[in-house]
Amino acid sequence: MEKSLEIREVRSNYTDDQNYIHIDVWLSDDDNEEGTTAAIVCGDTKKVFFIDNRLRNNSLILEEISQILKSL
């Protein structure tokens, strides 16, 4: 069984020019680490697209999605 990912930080401060809001995660406290996109929320349709299915039930990601949807 795969070890669960331990997320250190979640950000959703990037919206691309097609109005997709990217939810990015960082897995370590290393300032040099690049974040990876876990999910994308369409700002027009409010549909959520998971890029990393291992994070589909992660409470931090779900809370971030909830906050984004409330703000739309």
Image: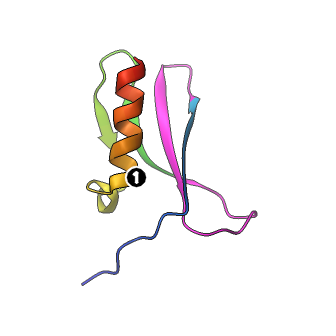
Side of 27 relative to 38 (left or right): right
Q: Which residues are magenta?
A: 15-36
Could you tell me residue 26's position as x and y percent? Answer: 57, 60
Side of 48 relative to 7 (left or right): left
Side of 37 relative to 41 (left or right): right
The residue singled out by tag 1 in the image is 60
Question: Where is 29 relative to 12, above or below?
Answer: below
Q: Which SS class for mark 1? A: helix
Identify the image quadrant of the C terminus: top left
The colour mode here is rainbow
Could you tell me residue 47's position as x and y percent? Answer: 28, 28
| Residue at 48% from the left image edge and 30% from the top image edge | 21
Question: Where is 62 relative to 22, above or below?
Answer: below
Residue type for callout 1:
Leu
Considering every residue shown, the one lying at the far right of the view is 32
Query: Tag count in the figure?
Result: 1
Query: Within 10 Å of the Cα at label 1, are there few (<14), some (14-19), or many (20+) other Cα atoms?
Result: some
| Residue at 34% from the left image edge and 34% from the top image edge | 66
Side of 39 relative to 14 (left or right): left
The answer to if 23 sits in the magenta stretch is yes
Identify the image quadrant of the N terminus: bottom left
Which picture quadrant has residue 52?
A: bottom left
Question: Where is 4 relative to 72, above or below?
Answer: below
| Residue at 40% from the left image edge and 52% from the top image edge | 60
| Residue at 65% from the left image edge and 58% from the top image edge | 34
- Of residue 4 and residue 42, the one placed in the foreground of this image is 4
Question: Where is 15 relative to 51, above or below?
Answer: above
The answer to if 42 sits in the magenta stretch is no
Could you tell me residue 56's position as x and y percent? Answer: 28, 53
